[in-house]
Every structure is written in C-alpha cells, then in structure tokens.
Amino acid sequence: MNLYRENISKLLSVNPFRVSQAVGGVLALQGFFRSLPIIYGAHGCVEAIGQLLSQHFREPVALENVTIHDSNLIFGGDDSARDALEMAMSRYKPDLTVLIGTSLTEMVGEDLENDVKQFIQERAGALRKKLVLSLHMPDYEGSLETGYARMTERVVEAVIGLSGKTARKKRRNRINLLPGPHLTPGDVMELKEIISSFGLEVITLPDLSSSLCGHLLIGNTKLSRGGVPLDYLDKMLTSGCTIAVGGCMEGAARLIEQASGIPYRVFPSLTGLQATDDFFEFLIKESRSDVEVKYRWQRQILLDSMLDARCVYQGKSIIAALEPDHLLGLSEWLGEMGVKVFRAVAPSASPVLEHIKDGAIIGDLEDMERMAKEGADLWIGSSHGEPGAQRAGVAFEPMGFPVFGRLCTSLAVSVGYRGTTELLGRVGNALLTTESGVRK
Amino acid sequence: MPKGRNNLFVEPDCEHNNQEKKGCVRPKPGGVSRGCPFAGSLAALTPIADAAHLVHGTAGCLESGWGHPGNRIDTGSLSGYGFSTQLNNRDMTMGGERKLLQSIGYIAVNYRPPAIFVYATCVTVLLMEDIDSICEEAEQVWGLPVIPVHSPGLTGSSGNMGRKLAGEALMDRVIGKGSHKREEITEFDINLIGEYSGTEEGHSIVELLAKAGIRVLAQITGESRYEEVSRSHLAKVNMVVCSRSMITLVRKMKDKYAIPYFEGSFYGEREIRFAMRQIGFHFHNPDLDKRLHRFIRKEEERLRAELAPARKALKGKTAVLYTDGVDSWIYLTMLQELGLKIAAIGTNRNAQEDLSRIRERLTNGTQIINDCDDHQIVKIYRDRKADLMIVSGRNEFVPLKERIPFLNVAPDRHVSYAGYDGVSNFAHDLLGTLEQPVWVISGKSAPWEG
C-alpha cells in the first residue's frame, strides 16, 4: 500500500532540497536549439537559477531577465516585458523565446500571455518561423520535475499549434524520445544511440545531450548551445511512436497522441536489467530488426557484474532524496539488486510515488537525516545532503540535482545495460568503502 | 530620494554623497544582471554560524543561499543548515504568519540556537506580513533573540544593498547586546568588517594578524559566533576589509561606541603594509608600532626570496580582467607587484567607490570598460594580444568557451589569496594557469581537419 503523504506536523522545511519549477523550465529550454528563457522576476530569481544550473553542469546557461522594479509591481510591468522581448529579439535573434513568470509576477497578476500576444502582433512579419511563448512557473508549487515537464508540454503544444492538426502520413521508422529531467545528458546520448542502432530515426525533445554535455563547437554565445532545432520539431507529428522516459513526461506524449494519433509508451525509468529488457523488446517490435551484437555483450557483462555485486548489495539499507521519477527508477533497480530496505524522500507529490515498494514520504533533508541515524548504509541524493550524511556518519553518493564539486556528473550514464553496469559500480563501490571503513 | 533625510542612500561617509541625485532610473532589461538584496543579506549573515537563519518565502529563495561549496564553515552547530517556511499555494491565500511563528518555535525547541534571524522575501512583502511583531512575539515565548531582516529582492538590484540592510539589523539588534567579559578582552582587539572571499581568506587574515600580536574580536561577517558579534562593540578599532557595503555599520559604531575605523585590504604587499600601519596608528602604541614594523620587514624579505622565480617568469605578461564588485580592484596591486601588465578591465557590477579604487591603482594604458559585455572583452583580449584573463563569478565561461587561458578568482578555490602567503598562492596559480598544457592542446586541430 502506498505510504506517501505530506508531513503535516512540521510546518517549516529544514534543509530543503526542493528545486523551484523555474529551474526545471530553464533546463528544458536548454534542450532546444537557439532558445532563450526570459525570467520575469526579481534579480535574485534569475541569478539563483543561472548559478545553480551552471554549477551543476559546469556549462553556461542561456538565460535573460526582465528587470523588475517596485513600480512594476504597482503600475504593472507590460512595458518592461516588452522591452525585454525587444532586446532579446534584436540582440540575439533566438528561435524560441519563453517569458517565464515567477511567484512574484503571479501574485501581482501580471498578464504574460497578453504581453506576448501584443508583442507578436506588433511584429507580425519578423517573427515567422520563430516561437515566442509565455509560461507561469511560480515556485510555491511543484518542483524541478514538474517545471521541466510543463515547459516541454508548452513547447510541444506550440509546435502542434504551428503545424495544425491535419493527419499526415506517418513514418514508421521515426521515434519521438521524451527524456525526463532525471536523465543526464550522457543518459540521453546513450538512449539515442540505442534507438538508432535499430535503424530508427530519433527526435529527442528536449535534447540535453548535445547542449549541456560540454563542447566547444560554437564558442561563447548567449543562446542555448545545442538541442533539437525548431524546424525539425514538427516532424515529430509524423513519427511512428513516442517513448516517454519518466512519468512526468506522459503529459507531452499525450499531447502528441491527441494531435496526430501517435501511440506512446511510458517507461518509468531505463535503469536495471528488467527495465532495459522491456525497452529492447519494444524497440525490436517497433523496428522489426535485430539487436546489435554490442548490446548482447553489454547484457552479458551486466549479468556478470550483478553476480559479482550480489553480496555487496545483499541485505543493505539505502535511503534516497530525489525527484519522484528518479526515486521510482532507483527503487526498481535496487530491488533487483537484493537491497533489503529502500526508503525514499521526495520534494513534492507525484502519482509515481505510489509505485515505490516501501513507500515514500514528501519531506526534507531533516527527514533524511533522521532516517540515516536510524540506520542506513548509503545516502543517495543531491549535494545539499552531503553535510547531513556526514553528520549522520553515513556514506554518500551524489545523484540528482544539483551536484557540486564533482567532475563529469552530466556525462555519467545509468540507463541501458552499460549504464546500469556503471551505476552498479558507482553505488557498489560506495557501499564497499563503508564496509571496509567499519572493519578498520 | 529626499535630500538630507537620513536614509540608506545617504551615507555621510561616502564620496558619492555630495553628487547630484539622478533620481529613479528605470532599469534596463536583460544583459547585465545584478544581485539580489535578499541574497546579499543572507550571504552577509549566514557566516554567523551557530545562529539559525530562517527564510520566510517560497522554495526558490533559499536555493541560492545554502549548501554551496566554499561556504562550509566549521564553527557552530547550525552552519550548513537551511531553514525555510517554504510557503505553498495555500499560504499564498491564507497568509504565512502563523506558519512563521510555529517555524520559529520548531527551531527554538529542536535546535536551541543562540539567536534566529528571520528573512523577509518578495512574497512576504507582497502578502503584507507583519514580520516584526511575529519576531517580537516569538522572542517573548521562547526567550531568545529573533531578529527580522528586511531586504526583499524587489527593493533593489544589488547584493550590496542587502549587505547594508543586514548591517542595519546587526546594529539595531545584535551589536552591543553581548555581556562584558573582562578576562576575554585583550589590549589589541579589532573587528574585521566587510566582505572578503569566504572562510579561507578569513582564516588567513586572522592568522596573519595573530602573528603580529593583534587579536580579531569579531568578523562582521566572516565565520563567527553570534556571541562574538554581539560583543564586537568592545573592540578598539574597526577595519573595513575590501568592501564598503557595511560602511554605514562602522560609521554608526563610531558614533555610538567611539570606535575609529579605517579601510584597507590584505591583497598584495603594499596593501598589507598600509593596513598594518593603519592598525598601529589607531592604537597609539609605540611598542606595537615597532613590532609591526619588524614583522612587516621580516615577512616582506621572506616573500621576496620566495617569489623571485615566479616574478621572473611572470614579468611582462599581460592580463585582462573581467570581474565583478571588489574582485575588480583587490587583485590589481598583486598583479602589478608580480610584474604583470593590465591591458583592460571589464566591469559590470561596480559601485562608484569600486571604480575610484580601480583608478587609484592603475597606471596608464589600461582601458576600463564599464557595463562590459562578453563580446567586447574577448575582442579587446585578442586586440591587445594578452596572455591570460582573470575572471570572477559567472564570467568564467566566456574565456573557457573561447579557449583563452584564465584564472577564476571566485571563492570556490581552496587556497587564500589574502596575506603574505596569499601573494605567493596567487603567483603560483597565475603561473600554473599559464603553464597548463591544455591551452596549447586545445588549439590543435583534429586529425580530420588536416
């Protein structure tokens, strides 16, 4: 039975790890080529979002702001919004611009949609083949995951709006891939490789694998550095099917289905032997072709590693503080590995939490610390948890967002057979280190 | 702002005070983004590490202020803790005052800090929450100081303003409240006031002064305890280090407790010498003067020998700076002393005082670009054929993506650049940067590019 609930006895949040929706929204936009998020909020909001993303990915992030002033809050700020859009258009010429509202603009009732509509009307001709959108993303609800998903939905919706709902001829050998925010750019790259190994063309949205993976191809720029181009996006309406990875991406997949009848399949996560087997089975059916030898090998290697790691994982108790989709994936995989107890804390509610076997609570890192002190072998979560894990004397493995002070986090792979093997090594080694620590 | 009225824009000890007022300018969108007053206050006060810092706002507000590398502090049981009322959808309509009071109670009962700082944010201002009276009520119920800090992000566009407001809160509610413990007061007690780059710098400055026989009573604010700050009025001299964000605080301390202050920096031989002499001057003690003089001479001789090889290697190299705030001028002296030429400085977050400090320290031939953008700085770097760039904050990615050799002076490094050892750390980091093989390798073309 599901055990997830909000801790109502505690009103405040001690050591919170909830990341605001707007961060998720800005992150999603980095996966679209030449895009520019414009945050409509106080200076601090923009700065915090930019810094957080840059520190995690060790990459610059495309981000601008509408400068808010006391007077905006009293007399309305549509001039400021228009100025910001004007500036962005004339200076950087982005293909996709999204005006993002914060809790501040939400509270004073700023009408972003109207601002954008007027702006588009004024410049009708100049904006052809470009998208200018608005989206409210107040940080008093949801978290990174919902923000990322909502932004993806918004863009999908706009692309559908551009190309109309007309039924077009489908191409069976094309697949839409909607990766959730718990996947690293490395993960997305791995999935793209697997899918194309079946001779399938893949449209990924948002595509972080070519933008936040770290490259020097275009030098210094203010726009997003990679991702899927806008003029390629409308091809998603003629694909054979859609794959959503993570429950939060189902909304976008459903939008595509409604618009052009493309069936979709949601994979909660692609970590672990069973999950990857399901994924390959699906691809074999979809493409009607065979698996490459490389992946047969990778599966053998994973099985062997699982046998090697058997006793390291057996009977262990692991706690994790991550976004809901990430937690579910981890819980399934750790179940496969024979971990005895897996306890989870999520920053905000999501229907997927019901499927976590031992249940999950919605809470903060104080809850994690309490669980750690009650007895755990490993703490998995974002860097915000590291001091807590140290205080509780529990080994720590960084995962999720944000992770500070580690190299190549964005390229770590934990999906598919190879990725699962890699993850198994990382987590297993962390467990081994504590074991030897105890013996000393 | 009305002339003559006492408010935070009128600071008698500031040079911009006699200038004509510009009035309210409508801020320009995008491009150069400046800081957040709330984040400034939080950054200024969280180094008081045993106190609890409770943010009364939504989820995003605390995000920028805690758990970042570089501000891990060893003092105090609550360093590294983040407290937030994390207002949700329901609170937006019902108000968060009750939640705030109970949150304060939760912290007071479960964590027993010596004091709780409560930060107002944009959202709570718009909700018109009466934070002052809640803090007062909480103070009576749980019997510990609960200090409201009023610096919501929408009050302005600079972190400096937030630091200033944090200083106001300290002056009103903390400084002077500590009890007098005679045995703990020494003859040469000073306070360090202002912003230096994180705990490493603080440690090395305190150590340097200790070697010279001077005791730092409180760092306002560097790594410190609440009690230290509350007793800081017992010091004999205040030193404003690098930043002028807390100038109002020291001026008020001078008026109220007759503590003289001076401004100085610990970055570079010449600056350290000046700071030490000022300290000697303010204590009026011939013995101390002599001791300081000896100390300076000894340290400078040691440093000269140690730095000779680095100086030789660095001589004649040209640097371009792309930095924010105090970082724009504190490293200038050191760069010059090490024999580097400075081709240009791009600044975009500087107060007038910072700009005059840049000018004071420069020789001819350096270009100052105000409100500089990425394109300009890269162009001038290439035009002047400079050897490396020095950056801080979010400018880091400009040289990185352009494959330009650069040194990031932001405080996520693990060595201090302050004090005599700092000079040599800085020299070695500069050399190390220039010698990195990656700058050559990254210019090499791929095998398929011919």
Image (cartoon, coloured by chain):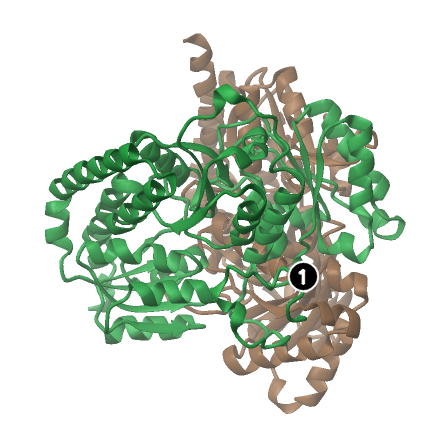
Find residue B167 and report its horizontal and vertical position in percent.
59, 47
The three-letter code of the residue at mark 1 reads Thr
- Taking A126 as reference, is A278 above or below it? above
- The quarter of the image holding the C terminus of chain A is top left
Q: Nearer the viewer, residue B102 or A82?
A: B102
Residue A199 placement, left or right of B315? right
Residue B128 in view (yes/no): yes
Residue placed most toward the observer, B376 or B363: B363
Look at the picture and state if A33 lies above or below B197: below
Q: Position of residue A201 (x, y in %)?
A: 53, 62
Instruction: State which chain is coloured brown.
Output: A
Identity of the residue furthest to the top in this view: A439
Q: Nearer the viewer, residue A270 or B240?
A: B240
Q: Which of the pair B342/B17 is nearer the observer?
A: B17
- Tell me where residue B423 appears, x and y as whole percent: 25, 45
State the residue position of label 1. B155
The residue positioned 47% from the left and 40% from the top of the image is: B69
Instruction: Locate residue A303, reporting x and y percent.
Output: 48, 28
Q: What color is chain B drawn in? A: green
Q: Secondary structure at mark 1?
A: helix
Q: Is residue A219 visible?
A: no
